[in-house]
Amino acid sequence: GFETADRWMINLDNIDAKDSLDALITMQNLKRNLLAEDEIENVSFTKEVAPFINSQWMDGTDEGGFEMQTYLAPADKNFGDVMNMNLTEGRWFIEEDYDAVIKPMVVNQNFMDAYYPNTSMIDSIILFHGERRLVGVVDEYRYAGEFEEAHNIRFDPEPYTQLMSNAIIKLRSGTTMAYAEKLSNLINTTTKTTGSSIQSLEKRKMES
């Protein structure tokens, strides 16, 4: 359900341990510096629920008159492009979604088949810890690996400045691992840490 070629994931080192203003400035500087690199086309930030990381957040409700269970994946507005998510209906998040009165969500087809089979619910209000507007449906997101059992997935929009665990970068085609050393130096200088690590998602996919 997502692209791994020319995608690297950066496990960020304790940015969330900084005080709130320092963390905010660090995230803003990091995003700006990454996007200034010729080798990088786009960047998205995530929490612990990220590709090939064994972390799962579950959420459930019965507000709509029946029980719904999902795996929760916070995501910023760039995640859809960076990961080349395949939308079958609707759209991915946009900047305005962060402050929307009715919080939007994107779900996978497994969610739709489980709770709203053979029905289009785009722009409909679904009760899930309050009102949420369904804005998009993706076909898959098996973030633990392609042989993972299919789960119901719900994406919630969060600004990148609140997603301090991992960065996923979309590289220009042909970028080699030799670039990782320069990238590591940039990350360490920007974040003033030395514990961040860089991994190829293609390699992680082969190992999963």
Image (cartoon, rainbow, N blue to C red):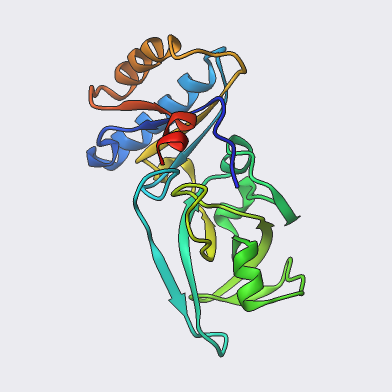
Residue 93 placement (x, y as % from top left): 63, 50
Q: Is residue 189 above or below residue 196?
A: above
In this rendering, does residue 102 appear at all? no
Q: Is residue 129 above or below residue 12?
A: below
Residue at the spot 61% in from the left edge and 66% down from the top edge: 110
List x then y, in percent, for residue 112.
65, 70
**Residue at image point 26% right, 22% down:** 192
Q: Nearer the viewer, residue 183 or 163?
A: 183
Q: Who's the residue at 49% across and 68% down the image?
A: 70
Q: Is residue 87 left or right of residue 32?
A: right
* x, y percent for residue 4: 54, 33
Q: Residue at x 35, y 29 (%)?
A: 26
- Judge from the rendering whether residue 14 lies leftward or rightward of residue 174; answer left or right: left
State which quadrant residue 208 falls in. Answer: top left
> How many numbered callouts?
0
Instruction: Give the vertical position of 163 relative to 43 (above or below).
Output: below
In the image, 104 versus 65, the foreground residue is 65
Residue 75 in the image, given as x and y percentages of width and height: 51, 49
Report whether residue 116 is seen.
yes
- Examine the rendered structure and indicate whether residue 189 appears above or below residue 115: above
